[in-house]
C-alpha cells in the first residue's frame, strides 16, 4: 500500500508547514524497529567493512540512516549523487552533514560531456517528452555516477521503505542488486511517522523542502509539492504512470526490473 499524506494544497507559491509537526509521532513498536535497524547496520558493517557505503539521497530516511551511522560510530562511508539538477536546499545538506557529524560526504557527479551532449541534442526539458528520454536523463545524471560510487563496493545502504509506494511494498531488509552487491534497506519496515519521530527526537538535520509539502525529493525539474490526500511519491515524475516512477537506481538481480 502506498502512503497517503494529508496536507494543505500549496496555492500561489510555496506554502510551508513544519514536517515534524505534520508527521512525527511515536507509534507502537518504534523502539524495537529502531533497535533492529541499528543491529542491521552493525551487522552489515561487520560483514562488509570498507566495502560498504551509504548511498544517500539526502532525503528524510537517509538523514536518519546517516545519523545512526554517526551516532553508533559505524565505519560506513557516506556518498551521494549530485545530478546537477538538485535544489539548493538539498545541496545545503552536504556541508551540514560534514559539520554536524565530522564525516566526509563523497559526491559523485555525471560526466560533464555526456550532460552537455544530452541537453544540446534532446533539450533542457527532454524528461517531460517521453519515458525513454526521462530514463536517458536519469541514466546520465544518476545511474552512471552511481556505478562509480559502487565500484569496488560489496554492499550499499538505502533508505527504501515498504510504505513509500506500491512498487516498494515488498522491499526486503537486504537483497542483491543487478551486479550482485548486497543492498541493505535498513528502514524497510519503518513508517513515515517513525522517520520523523526519530528526526525530532535526535534533532537530525533535514531538507527544508520537507516543510514545503515535498515528502519525496529528487531533481528540481522532476519534483513538485503534493496536495491533500496525494500519495507519498505523487510529486515525483507526476506526469508519468505510477508503474514507471523509478529512476533505475534500484534494479534487482533476480528480476532484472526496477524495484
Ligand atoms: S530525476 Fe529528472 S532531472 Fe533528475 S536525472 Fe532523472 S530525469 Fe533527469
Image (cartoon, rainbow, N blue to C red):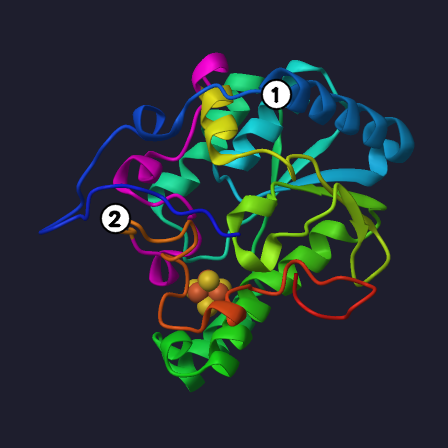
Q: Which residue is mark 2?
A: 228
Q: Secondary structure at mark 1?
A: loop
Q: Position of residue 94 (x, y in %)?
A: 49, 34
Q: Foreground: 22 or 144?
A: 22
Answer few, some or many: residues within 10 Å of disc 2's Cα (few below 14, many 20 plus, some between 14 and 19): few
Residue 209 magenta-highlighted: yes
Q: Judge left or right: residue 76 versus residue 160.
A: right
Residue 97 in view in this figure: yes
As drawn, 107 above or below 103: below
Q: Position of residue 174 (x, y in %)?
A: 78, 44
Residue, far bottom: 121
Q: Position of residue 191 (x, y in %)?
A: 53, 34
In which image quadrant can residue 90 be found? top left
Numbered tag placed on residue 235 in the rendering: none
Task: Classify residue 207 as left or right of residue 139.
Answer: left
Residue identified by numbered label 1: 29
The residue that appears at 47% across and 75% down in the rendered structure is 134
Q: Residue 196: where, in percent of width, then height? A: 45, 26
Residue at the (81%, 63%) spot, across then down: 253
- Residue visible at 61% across and 20% down in the picture: 29
Quadrant where the image shows the C terminus: bottom right
How many numbered marks, from 0 up? 2
| Magenta-drawn segment | 200-224
First in sequence: mark 1 or mark 2? 1
Using the image, determine if residue 102 lies above or below residue 44. above
Q: Residue at x 53, y 67 (%)?
A: 138
The verdict on residue 206 being magenta is: yes
| Looking at the image, residue 74 lies above or below residue 242 | above
Amino acid at each position: 500500500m502506498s502512503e497517503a499524506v494529508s496536507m494543505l494544497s500549496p496555492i500561489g507559491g510555496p506554502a510551508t508547514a513544519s514536517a515534524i509537526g505534520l508527521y512525527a509521532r511515536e507509534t507502537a513498536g518504534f523502539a524495537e524497529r529502531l533497535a533492529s535497524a541499528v543491529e542491521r547496520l552493525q551487522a552489515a558493517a561487520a560483514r562488509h567493512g570498507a566495502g560498504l557505503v551509504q548511498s544517500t539521497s539526502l532525503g528524510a530516511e537517509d538523514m536518519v540512516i546517516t545519523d545512526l551511522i554517526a551516532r553508533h560510530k559505524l565505519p560506513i562511508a557516506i556518498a551521494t549523487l549530485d545530478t546537477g539538477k538538485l535544489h539548493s536546499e538539498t545541496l545545503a545538506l552536504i556541508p551540514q552533514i560534514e559539520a554536524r557529524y565530522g564525516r566526509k560526504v563523497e559526491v559523485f557527479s555525471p560526466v560533464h560531456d555526456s550532460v552537455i551532449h544530452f541537453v544540446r541534442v534532446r533539450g533542457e526539458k527532454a524528461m517531460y517528452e517521453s519515458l525513454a528520454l526521462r530514463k536517458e536523463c536519469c541514466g546520465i545524471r544518476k545511474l552512471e555516477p552511481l556505478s562509480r560510487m559502487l565500484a569496488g563496493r560489496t554492499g550499499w545502504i538505502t533508505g527504501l521503505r515498504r510504505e513509500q509506494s506500491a512498487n516498494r511494498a515488498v522491499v526486503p531488509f537486504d537483497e542483491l542488486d543487478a551486479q550482485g552487491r548486497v543492498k541493505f534497506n535498513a528502514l524497510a519496515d519503518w513508517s513515515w511517522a517513525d522517520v520523523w519521530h526519530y528526526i525530532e527526537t535526535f534533532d537530525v538535520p533535514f531538507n527544508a523542502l520537507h516543510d514545503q509539502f515535498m515528502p519525496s525529493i529528487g531533481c528540481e525539474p522532476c519534483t513538485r509539492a503534493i496536495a491533500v490526500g496525494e500519495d507519498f511519491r505523487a510529486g515525483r515524475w507526476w506526469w508519468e504512470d505510477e508503474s514507471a516512477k523509478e529512476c533505475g537506481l534500484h534494479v534487482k538481480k533476480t528480476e532484472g526490473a526496477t524495484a
